[in-house]
Image (cartoon, helix red, strand yellow):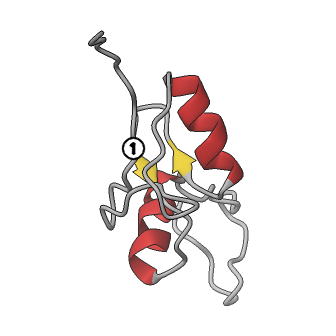
Amino acid sequence: MIREHTCITIDCDVCRSAYEPDEYAVHFRNLAEARDSTRREGWTITADGKVICGSEDDEHLAALDALMPPEPVMQVPGQLGFDGSEEPA
């Protein structure tokens, strides 16, 4: 009997490495299963479907940093900056 099955595999969007925790290609039944398994291994899957493996080299860290919102400005108008100068309002 021949049956058609749909499965999901995961590759890193930065380095294109496949998710192979025990050196074999893992096939998931659905996205929830894929997300849960890869997150336990330190991979990141964003809401828009980007996947970043757990490597900690400069390229991967830059990709993760790009996902972060900008740092808030903590200085109010008229407050002195850390260097002693007053920021323009």
Q: Residue at the location (58% across, 25% down)? A: 32
Side of 72 relative to 11 (left or right): right
Q: Residue at the location (71% across, 84% down)? A: 82
Closer to us: 74 or 54: 54
Query: From the image, which quarter does the N terminus lie in?
Result: top left
**Type of amino acid under label 1:** Lys
Binning the other alpha carbons within 10 Å of mark 1 as few (below 14), some (14 to 19) or many (20 upward) gives few
Residue 11 position within the rendered picture, expressed as x and y whole percent measured from the top left: 37, 52
Closer to us: 14 or 7: 7
Q: Residue at the location (44% across, 70% down)? A: 60
Closer to us: 54 or 74: 54
Tag 1 secondary structure:
loop
Side of 80 relative to 89 (left or right): right
**In this picture, is 14 found above or below 49?**
below
Side of 46 relative to 35 (left or right): left
- Residue 76 lies in quadrant: bottom right
**In this picture, is 1 found above or below 29?**
above
Question: Which residue sits furthest bottom?
Answer: 83
**In this picture, is 28 found above or below 11?**
above
Residue 78 position within the rendered picture, expressed as x and y whole percent measured from the top left: 68, 64
Q: Which residue is mark 1?
A: 50
Residue 7 position within the rendered picture, expressed as x and y whole percent measured from the top left: 39, 26
Report the label total.
Answer: 1
**In this picture, is 46 found above or below 1?**
below
Closer to us: 33 or 50: 33
Q: Residue at the location (28% across, 14% down)? A: 4
Question: Which residue sits furthest front?
Answer: 1
